[in-house]
């Protein structure tokens, strides 16, 4: 084969490689997990801002809200870095959910091999967080973060209540009313370190309704109490009067307290 022919083949091959590379850049398949990485980045940014309303809107339950607020409170620089540079390492679809492993480069105190794991509802238009975690942030001590003192789906409280009891006098006064003047012993509370939170849904004309205090989280500006309401308005239920109520004990802080509520509709 002549030198001119070899040169022509080399030029043609080089041109084909360049064209192929250009074509891949122009028409290459985008990262299918990128929308979920962006959703987690925006979630981290809302956590850094302490925007509990935006977090609740972007969550499928309250657990990731509490996690990111706690993480942003204890490791603000790390979470702020994640809000700007999370990238997808791997992803997996499981039914109607997506699990993504994310990483970020040069984040102090955290390896870039497996920075954040998140599970989201598989709604690409507006992914919502089901769970989020990171080995770079140790779980906070939680032996006494929230203790349930009493729960009743048919209490003696007929109206909606969101109350924080901060002293023993009010607690002694309130407990008999909650229990319908029953004989149950007054639960012990150290009001130097703890407060009691009472939430009641009010009267409902059927079964299937509920209210619970799921968790608590502390931001630099406030203490958040996450309340889950179970709504059964759209489903047939037993024709009886119910009055759901929940009473929990949580750590005391000097910060103002805010209730963050999430309503879950029962699926018929």
Image: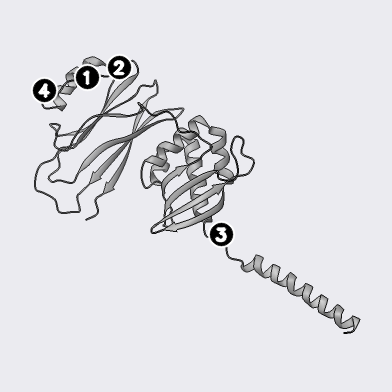
First-in-chain label (4 vs 2): 4
The residue that disc 2 covers is: 190
In percent of the image, x 13 and y 40: which residue is there?
Answer: 242
Give percent across and percent down for residue 235. 18, 54
C-alpha separation, residue under disc 2 versus residue under disc 1: 11 Å
In percent of the image, x 22 and y 19: which residue is there?
Answer: 171
Q: Any mark on residue 31, and which?
A: 3
The residue that disc 4 covers is: 183
Name the image quarter holding the N terminus.
Answer: bottom right
C-alpha separation, residue under disc 3 versus residue under disc 1: 56 Å
First-in-chain label (1 vs 4): 1
In percent of the image, x 39 and y 46: which residue is there?
Answer: 59
First-in-chain label (2 vs 1): 1
From this view, report whether residue 15 is shown above or below residue 89. below
Q: Secondary structure at mark 4?
A: loop
C-alpha separation, residue under disc 1 versus residue under disc 4: 15 Å
C-alpha separation, residue under disc 4 versus residue under disc 3: 62 Å
The residue that disc 1 covers is: 171
């Amino acid at each position: 084969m002549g030198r001119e022919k070899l040169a022509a083949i080399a030029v043609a091959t080089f041109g084909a490689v360049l064209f192929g590379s250009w074509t891949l850049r122009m028409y290459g398949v985008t990262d299918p997990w990128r929308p979920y990485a962006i959703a987690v980045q925006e979630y981290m940014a809302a956590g850094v801002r302490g925007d509990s309303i935006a977090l609740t809107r972007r969550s499928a339950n309250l657990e990731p809200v509490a996690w990111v607020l706690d993480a942003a409170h204890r490791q603000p620089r790390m979470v702020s870095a994640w809000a700007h540079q999370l990238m997808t390492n791997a992803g997996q679809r499981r039914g109607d959910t997506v699990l993504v492993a994310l990483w970020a480069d040069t984040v102090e105190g955290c390896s870039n091999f497996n920075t954040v794991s998140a599970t989201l509802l598989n709604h690409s238009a507006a992914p919502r967080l089901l769970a989020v975690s990171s080995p770079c942030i140790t779980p906070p001590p939680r032996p006494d973060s929230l203790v349930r003192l009493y729960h009743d789906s048919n209490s003696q409280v007929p109206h909606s209540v969101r109350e924080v009891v901060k002293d023993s006098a009010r607690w002694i006064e309130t407990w008999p009313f909650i229990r319908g003047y029953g004989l149950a012993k007054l639960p012990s509370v150290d009001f130097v370190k703890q407060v009691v939170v009472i939430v009641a849904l009010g009267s409902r004309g059927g079964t299937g309704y509920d209210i619970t205090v799921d968790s608590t989280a502390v931001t630099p500006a406030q203490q958040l109490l996450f309340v889950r309401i179970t709504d059964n308005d759209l489903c047939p239920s037993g024709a009886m009067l119910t009055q759901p109520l929940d009473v929990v004990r949580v750590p005391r802080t000097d910060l103002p307290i805010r209730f963050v509520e999430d309503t879950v509709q029962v699926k018929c």
